[in-house]
Amino acid sequence: MSVDTQQVPTELEEDELRTLDAHWRAANYLAVGQIYLMANPLLTEPLRPEHVKPRLLGHWGTSPGLNLVHTHLNRVIKARDLDALCIWGPGHGGPAVLANSWLEGTYTETYPDITRDAAGMARLFKQFSFPGGVPSHVAPETPGSIHEGGELGYALSHAYGAALDNPGLVVACVIGDGEAETGPLAASWHSNKFLDPVDDGAVLPILHLNGYKIANPTVLARIPEAELDDLLRGYGHDPIHVTGDDPAAVHRAMAAAMDTALDRIAALQRAAREDGVTDRPRWPVIVLRTPKGWTGPAEVDGLPVEGTWRAHQVPLAAVRDNPEHLRQLETWLRSYRPEELFDEHGAPRPEVLACVPAGTRRLGATPHANGGLLVRELPLPPLEKYAVEVDKPGATLHEPTRVLGDLLEDVMAATAERRDFRLVGPDETASNRLQAVYAASGKAWQAETLDVDEHLDRHGRVMEILSEHTCQGWLEGYLLTGRHGLFSCYEAFVHIVDSMVNQHVKWLRTTRRLPWRAPIASLNYLLTSHVWRQDHNGFSHQDPGFVDHILNKSPEAVRVYFPPDANTLLSVADHALRSRDYVNVIVAGKQPCFDWLSMEEAEVHCARGAGIWEWAGTEDGTREPDVVLACAGDVPTLEVLAAAQLLRRHLPELAVRVVNVVDIARLLPSEEHPHGMNDFEYDGLFTADKPVIFAYHGYPWLIHRLAYRRHGHPHTHVRGYKEIGTTTTPFDMVLSNDLDRYRLVMDVIDRVPGLAVRAAAVRQHMQDVRQRHHVWIREHGTDLPEVADWTWDG
């Protein structure tokens, strides 16, 4: 459908048109003021250079379009009493969203010193992108925001995540035409195949085509309209076009488009909820074409600006030094007629606020944008129900993630009525052994189904799409609006969302410093199908580096866990699902794994984060250990225990201590991470001067980075993944990377003083076994019997 500004039948009365335009002009004035002014906010005197900020920062080009959307959202929210949230994809248009928050009053309610008068307006202007002030983006500091938009690509997936299980919510999502060129945004259009019109809310995408990015035209703005329509219809949307540069005509067209879209959304939801229609809805999308930098300077220094890429950031860049630029800025600001918009005290006039809804209906005041106000405790059952029996260490095997799946099934069942828990992942729920959840909820799916399909459910809360970006965006939007979830992913491919988790950690770190932001449920990753059990898929699937990436982030917001067996995984998962305002990364295997600790032991060990496994070593308590065998990760733990067993057999006089680390941040100094150990605790565990052979799940240099300031660091030798991989056997993976039990025994012999000569024959035997393994697997295609059939006999 096209709503052309040249021929629009409109029901807007002239009075309403006038008030809408007044609100829009006021927002535009405030947006320009934030970019430029530090004094004289109402232009009560001629503009002088000292009224202008010395550094001009911000993005004007998108702001008038965002202001138009905000104004018209206000209108329909108030008229229809809508529960609404808006995702501002062009988050760099922060001046617009801040302006609207100030106009509607939520900014002053949140920050009482930014009053709705001339003094408050001056502070609003000066603080913008100013030292000690606020960021230029729609940041966590902005009321009503759950999406900063600093990195483009995630607006639409965040919007859908917010709409999931929010049946009364309408989520508008402004997508800039630059963002529309990104891969994550392109994939997220398919989210409408997962949105349940019965149990979920609605998403109204608003594709804002102003024609340009920073310095180039945008693809979707330059293709023929018919081609764009075909694209959007192919995605499953019905487009509604609003095009123009005459404000009155665009207001009428935008009002008609909003009414048409919301009428259609209501009809689609009514058909599904009341009439039982099960056809996949074709949801509306608004395509808004307005000039970049609309209402700004048409020309600067003889070059066109409005409607071009030159309007992207600061159209007049030399206002303090160039009198002509200063004159143009004053003319620009006065073109909005501020005296009509603000009274003599600087407060918005009633006409300006006529379209603004009240209370929590205001976009800046919706509790959905402060999800911690809505979040409820997750009903987590007692872990004893799922615990595996461990009469003695290493006597039984279980698939840890399959055991966790039973817990998640019950969590999914317990939240069936309240619908505030989702499991997301890229087509890997069953592959990662979590398929028990299907007994409580199928996989969300609104597209065609066939008889051969399994577990597809129009009302399902398991989300699978082969786009890690979309999975992450869905879950972030879901968490930020007050719900809970878990992201299950192959370890090697979670790297796809490296930059997305960057943004989320930064968001969490900032919100922790905002007392009005309530804590939200943590973003929980379960990384399985990990590096040491991707022997069948080969080198491309072998990468444990996500942990390194996460541990570079704010220590207050990130946690990384390596549970070595099923019971420790249950304990860690329980802790993560209960936590708030963290990014928790849990790395656990899905293949059969020895059970080392009972549930009670596991809970104590996980609470400790790192500890001595006395039953695994050969210390007798009468002297210090000769060597410490440390491990973090399920496979490294197995190899360390196998090495300890070999040492007991071949070098029984050696005092060996075995230390298992679940919480890798425990290695950090206590002053650098809340979970870190002080030096006394660390030295007591690892010793200050004895050799430490550390078998680690990931890249070995991470351990060195975490522990480099410890007294015992010069004596610490780390084995881990060295980027050596191929399609091979499981044990060949560890052997090729020198993480195997035989290499660990050799390391002990090499590093414990006096053993090199005394235990030379043992070392030679270890080397021979490694060589025999190399020949064996190439002949038989399986691991050595003593490895494949190994059991713990401690």
Image (spheres, grey):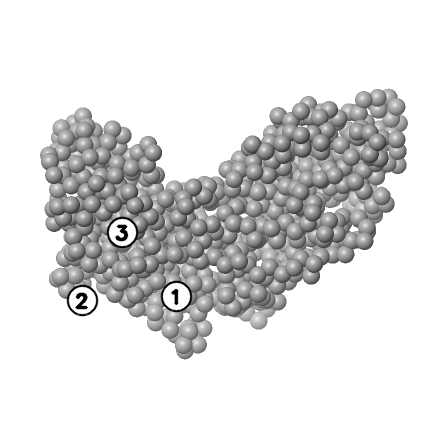
Q: Amino acid at mark 1?
A: Gly
Taking depth in this image into account, of 582 and 328 the one nearest to the observer is 582
Q: Residue furthest bottom?
A: 275
Q: Is label 2 or label 3 in front? A: 3
Residue highlighted by disc 3: 105
User: In the shown orientation, is residue 271 left or right of residue 69?
Assistant: right
Residue 558 position within the rendered picture, expressed as x and y whole percent measured from the top left: 54, 42
Image: 23 above or below 320 = below
* Residue 291 visible within the image: no
Pick whichever of labels 1 and 3 is earlier in the sequence: 3
Badge 2: residue crowd in 10 Å (few <14, some 14–19, many ≥20):
few
User: In the shown orientation, is residue 29 left or right of residue 239?
Assistant: left
Residue 764 position within the rendered picture, expressed as x and y whole percent measured from the top left: 85, 28
Q: Who's the residue at 23% across and 63% down the image?
A: 256
Q: Who's the residue at 19% across and 58% down the image?
A: 354
Q: Secondary structure at mark 3?
A: loop
Measure the alpha-carbon separation of dots 2 and 1: 26 Å
Q: Secondary structure at mark 1?
A: loop
Taking depth in this image into account, of 690 and 91 the one nearest to the observer is 690
Residue highlighted by disc 2: 11
Q: Is label 2 or label 1 in front? A: 1
Image: 582 above or below 671 = below
Q: Are marks 2 and 3 in contact (CB under 8 Å)?
A: no
Q: Who's the residue at 34% across and 71% down the image?
A: 267
Quarter of the rendering occupied by the C terminus: top right
Q: Amino acid at mark 3?
A: Gly
Q: Amino acid at mark 2?
A: Glu
Q: Who's the residue at 39% across and 53% down the image?
A: 369
Pick whichever of labels 2 and 3 is earlier in the sequence: 2
Measure the alpha-carbon separation of dots 1 and 3: 24 Å
User: In the shown orientation, is residue 49 left or right of residue 124?
Assistant: left
Taking depth in this image into account, of 367 and 90 the one nearest to the observer is 367
